[in-house]
Image (cartoon, rainbow, N blue to C red):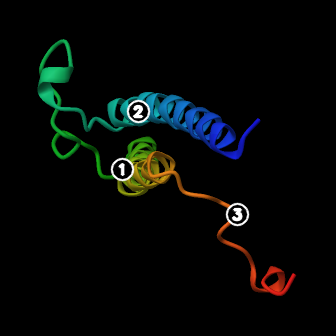
Amino acid sequence: MSDHKFAVHAAMAGTAVLLVKHVVTGFFGAAAKFKAGSRAPEDTPDGKQSFGVADADPKDETLKAAKLVEMRWNRITMNDLENVPIGLVTTWAAIAAGADGKIVTSPRNINK
């Protein structure tokens, strides 16, 4: 298999894995938002969500734990939104431009 063909297959596999990860992360993030009471009112059947700020008992440890889980999933999602698109664009742009992985070598291989 040529290097270019291998690069295309590797990029396709990586893109597919990241797509599945995005969908799974979305489901876990949404579940965390529902448990924390942070979903928008139009996302619930009764329309009575309060974005997690009203009608909450300040001593409710379950709600505090749910809020922490929600915040963690928000950070995971935001990290993916910051890093995955630029990585995919760079990968596919390098393939489209016909980049050659053999050009980049470590300093130890320069004199060989």
Q: Quadrant of the N terminus?
A: top right
Pointer 3 residue: 102
Give how far across and how far down residue 18 sits, in percent. 52, 38
Q: CA distance from mark 2 to mark 3?
A: 37 Å
Give neighbour class at mark 1: few <14, some 14-19, many 20+ (Cα, 10 Å).
few
Using the image, tell me which numbered label, if any, was put on residue 95.
none
The one of 20 and 100 positioned closer to us in this rendering: 100
Q: Amino acid at mark 3?
A: Lys
Contact between labelled residues 1 and 3, with CB atoms less than 8 Å apart: no
Mark 2 or 1: in front is 1
Q: CA distance from mark 2 to mark 1?
A: 11 Å
Mark 3 or 1: in front is 3
Q: State whether residue 103 is above or below residue 55.
A: below
Residue drawn where x is 45% and y is 52% of the image: 97
- Could you say whether the residue bearing mark 1 is in a helix, strand or loop? helix
Q: How many marks?
A: 3
The one of 88 and 3 positioned closer to us in this rendering: 3
Q: Quadrant of the C terminus?
A: bottom right
For marks 3 and 1 on the same chain, the one whose residue lies earlier in the sequence: 1
The one of 71 and 90 positioned closer to us in this rendering: 90
Q: State whether residue 25 is above or below residue 79.
A: above
Using the image, tell me which numbered label, if any, was put on residue 81.
1
Q: CA distance from mark 3 to mark 1?
A: 30 Å
Pointer 2 residue: 26
- Could you say whether the residue bearing mark 2 is in a helix, strand or loop? helix
For marks 2 and 1 on the same chain, the one whose residue lies earlier in the sequence: 2
Image-based side of 15 in relation to 66, left or right: right
Give how far across and how far down residue 81 sits, in percent. 36, 50
Asked where in the image residue 100 lies, by quadrant, the reply is bottom right
Q: Amino acid at mark 1?
A: Leu
The one of 59 and 75 positioned closer to us in this rendering: 75
